[in-house]
Image (spheres, helix red, strand yellow):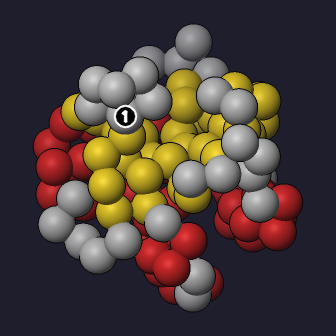
Amino acid sequence: MPYDESAASRVRALLRRRSGYAEKKMFGGLCFLMHGNMCCGLTGGGLMLRLGADGAAEALREPHTREMDFTGRPMKSMIFVEPDGYASGEALKRWLGTAATFASSLAPK
């Protein structure tokens, strides 16, 4: 599924100044990396976030979220946020900050 280029521009604007930032087309969409580790991404299904198992479990209590299940099996460390869940600039900034903090805690690749 294609990703929303407008959403990609919004994500870029918030992440591109961070150390280790990169982009890569993956999962049929666009992923954003921190020091080689996936931080987040965009697909036709919305915003993917890598939050770790505990962070993902907590985030799933929020509205507009669901488990990430590309293969039919949920990935316990990642979630999807539907577009309504990151429509505001403040919501997107909060989601991306959480994902970037997690990705930055991982050893660089």
Question: Quadrant of the rendered structure where residue 9 is?
Answer: bottom right
Q: Image point 77% across, 29% down: which residue?
A: 24
> Count the marks: how many?
1
| 23 w.r.t. 100: above or below | above
Residue 102 can be seen in this image:
no
On screen, residue 97 versus residue 44, left or right, reads left
Q: Secondary structure at mark 1?
A: loop
Q: Is residue 8 above or below residue 23?
A: below
**Could one spot residue 49 in this view of the protein?**
yes
**Relative to 6, 11 lies left or right:** left
Give amino acid for label 1.
Answer: Asp
Identify which residue is drawn at 48% across, 66% down. Answer: 82
Give percent across and percent down for residue 61. 16, 66
Q: Position of residue 81 (x, y in %)?
A: 44, 61
Could you tell whether 100 is left or right of 98 in the image? right
In the rendered view, tell whether residue 52 sits above or below residue 58: above
Q: Which residue is mark 1?
A: 69
Residue 71: percent from the left, percent from the top?
41, 22
> In percent of the image, x 39 and y 57: which residue is there?
98
Q: Is 42 situated left or right of 78 in this image?
A: right
| Image quarter (top left, top right, bottom left or bottom right) of the C terminus | top right
In-front residue for pair 75/98: 75
**Residue ID at (28%, 25%):** 73
